[in-house]
Image (spheres, grey):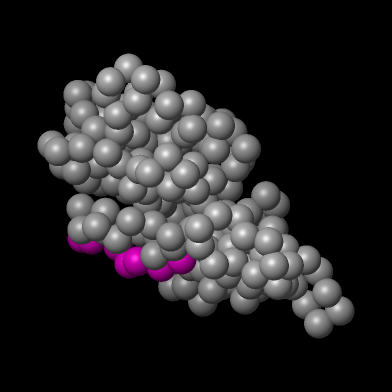
Amino acid sequence: MPRVLVVVAVDAERAALGARCLGSAGVEVAVAGIGRTNAAAATAEALALARAGGRPFGAAVSAGIAGSLPGSGLAPGAVVISERCVYAEEGIELPAGFGDMSTLGFPLGPFRGNSVPVDRTLWAPFAALGPVAPIATVATCSGTDAAARRIRERTHAAAEAMEGAAVVHAALRAGVPGIEVRAISNTTGDRPRQQWDMPRALAALGAVGDAIAALAG
């Protein structure tokens, strides 16, 4: 079975993965910090160090909490598995609206536009936990209804977080299969009306951690 690198943003997410995941000899968890720059740097560093040490990783998982986007049907405590990871901001603002990197004509990587592909063979270990859908990677969280609608329309994503595309992108560059799995902690939209349940989200990450441990064998 593959050694699995798990990248989370904060210590609370790491702890929520649970004893089975954290105690697995085949799992290493990196706490990268918030945002895609931290996520990409930490992922690339961990993958390079493991390869140099002769113990390369066979899979990389971006795990943590996320906000559900309008129309997704995802409530706090739900788990979503990435169908693809979509950079939400990279592109160009035009009079007709937003254009992604394919509009600019400059590729971000060996994929079209802003959608970083995940390794579909990694869906199976998480299949019982929740639906498969696109997940957006944002630099600015959606704290208004208008912002949440824009991200939904721009990316067709069910949820937004701040690291996933960067983790999977860094893994792709290193030739390592990658995926993003998120537990919903809140709805997006106007901040005063958002619904939050962090305990339920962190509890759901325990099931994600169990699935990661099973993947690592």
Q: Is residue 147 above or below residue 24?
A: below
In front of the other: 42 or 189: 42
- How far from the left and from the top, in percent, is residue 29? 36, 29
Q: Residue at x 60, y 55 (%)?
A: 108
Residue at x-position 32% and y-position 67%? 131
Q: Quadrant of the N terminus?
A: top left
Q: Residue at x 68, y 61 (%)?
A: 106
Q: Quadrant of residue 88?
A: bottom right
Q: Nearer the viewer, residue 199 or 180?
A: 180
Instruction: Identify the image quadrant of residue 12.
Output: top left
Left or right for 84, reference 69: left
Instruction: Please report the bounds of the magenta region as a residue range.
Output: 127-134
Residue shown at 54%/46% (left/top)?
166
- In-front residue for pair 86/202: 86
Q: Report x, y in % for residue 91.
A: 72, 63
Q: Position of residue 101 (x, y in %)?
A: 67, 65
Q: Position of residue 145 (x, y in %)?
A: 69, 69
Q: Could you tell me what secondary structure mostly forms the magenta stretch?
A: loop
- Position above or below: 48 against 191: above
